[in-house]
Image (spheres, rainbow, N blue to C red):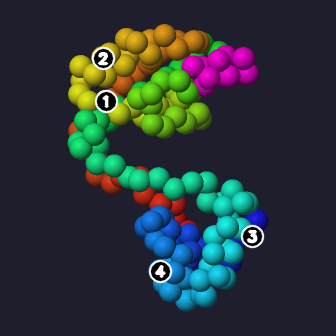
């Protein structure tokens, strides 16, 4: 799907505030509400807009410790990668996972309450993942810039 300037303006506005009403969004991007609604629905159906979420304060929900785990697998066959990814998808404390190029195969972002909670997550889940050869964990000291919208 090709996106024009109006589509990008709509996407920028929705990334700033996904709770905008259609009327407010239409006013912000200078379209009629019906034309704005059609564009948003078209982008949803095409998979450009994949969903709407609320960003939470990690401290408010007791998940203020961010840990990045570099994981190297024993091999890189499709079976090993698939088994690892399927098992990792069932770890509730993992908020992001990226297949990497470089020294580690995966970079996993874990949100924990504290270091003891991460030790539990490591013991109960991470150490049991299939195909793992090595893991290196790094604790974030402070979040300087949290994930936001995509640059458009």
Place residue 80 in its image quadrant.
top right
Q: 10 or 136: nearer the eye?
A: 10
Q: 136 or 109: nearer the eye?
A: 109
Sequence-wise, the earlier of marks 3 and 2 is 3
Q: Residues within 10 Å of mark 4 (few under 14, many from 20)?
A: few
Horizontal relation, residue 9 to residue 115: left or right: right
Please report contact status of discs 2 and 1: CB closer than 8 Å, yes or no. Answer: no
- Element on which disc 4 rests: helix
Place residue 152 in its image quadrant.
bottom right
CA distance for labels 1 and 4: 37 Å
Q: Nearer the viewer, mark 2 or mark 4?
A: 4
Please report contact status of discs 3 and 4: CB closer than 8 Å, yes or no. Answer: no
Residue holding disc 4: 24
Write the residue at 41% across / 53% down.
Answer: 54
- Element on which disc 3 rests: loop
Sequence-wise, the earlier of marks 3 and 4 is 3
Sequence-wise, the earlier of marks 2 and 4 is 4
């Amino acid at each position: 799907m090709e996106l024009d300037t109006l589509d990008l303006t709509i996407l920028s506005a929705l990334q700033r505030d996904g709770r905008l009403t259609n009327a407010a969004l239409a006013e912000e991007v200078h379209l009629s509400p019906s034309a704005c609604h059609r564009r948003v629905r078209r982008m949803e159906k095409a998979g450009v807009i994949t969903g709407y979420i609320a960003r939470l304060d990690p401290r408010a929900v007791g998940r203020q410790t961010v840990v990045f785990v570099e994981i190297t697998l024993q091999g890189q066959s499709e079976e090993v990668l698939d088994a690892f990814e399927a098992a990792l998808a069932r770890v509730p404390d993992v908020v992001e996972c990226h297949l990497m190029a470089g020294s580690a195969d995966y970079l996993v972002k874990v949100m924990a309450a504290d270091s003891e909670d991460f030790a539990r997550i490591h013991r109960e889940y991470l150490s049991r993942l299939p195909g793992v050869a090595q893991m290196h964990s790094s604790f974030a000291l402070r979040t300087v810039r949290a994930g936001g919208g995509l640059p458009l």
